[in-house]
Image (tube, rainbow, N blue to C red):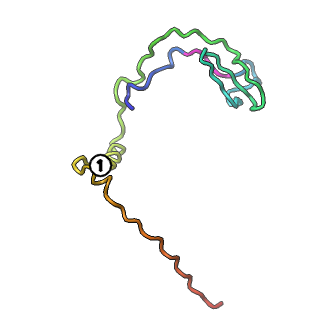
Amino acid sequence: MYHDDFVDYSGNLRYTSIRPGNKPHDPVVTDIRWLQYDPAGIIRYKLKFDDGFQDLPRRPRASQVDAYPQLHNGPLAIPKDKWDDLQSLVCQKNLGTFTTTYPIKVKASAKPKERAKFDV
């Protein structure tokens, strides 16, 4: 993945919230058990798995944006210690397929040692 694979969707949201209620003591987001997204842009929810789907009590805004801006302008920097750790995992190119095709010897399972018996 590259930095240009990430898009910023925060500017043009179809719904302002997915909370299933509007007033105090109405259900909140953590009460939702199932969300269903319809390709037409409608979001439905269930508060219990046995209940039927209900539409969110908010009207979706019409989305007229065809292209969204990039989330990042360039690759994000990582700390030096993380970079060093990643470099330790990289195989050297001049080794070719040596590291991937080298045969591995698997040890046969050893017999468990007998415990010393003590007279009590």
Q: Residue at x 78, y 31 (%)?
A: 50
Closer to us: 51 or 87:
51
Packing grade of label 1 (10 A; few <14, some 14-19, many >=20) is few
User: How would you classify the magenta stretch by its main secondary structure?
Assistant: loop
Closer to us: 6 or 79:
6
Magenta stretch in the rendered image: 13-19
Q: Is residue 26 above or below residue 40?
A: below
Q: Residue at x 73, y 20 (%)?
A: 54
Number of on-image labels:
1
Please provide percent x and percent y for residue 70.
41, 20
Please provide percent x and percent y for residue 79.
36, 40
Please provide percent x and percent y for residue 60.
62, 12
Q: Circle 1 sits on which residue? A: 91
Q: Is residue 119 left or right of residue 24?
A: left
Hey, which quadrant is residue 58 in on the image? top right
Closer to us: 99 or 115:
99
Q: Is residue 66 above or below residue 17?
A: above
Q: Is residue 36 above or below residue 101?
A: above
Hey, which quadrant is residue 19 in on the image? top right
Tell me the quadrant of the picture where the N terminus can be found. Answer: top left
Q: Residue at x 72, y 18 (%)?
A: 22
* Residue sitting farthest toward the bottom: 119
Label 1: state its secondary structure. Answer: loop
Tell me the quadrant of the picture where the C terminus can be found. Answer: bottom right
Q: Is residue 56 above or below residue 81?
A: above
Residue 34 lies within the magenta run: no
Please provide percent x and percent y for residue 62.
57, 9
Callout 1 amino acid? Cys
Residue 15 lies within the magenta run: yes
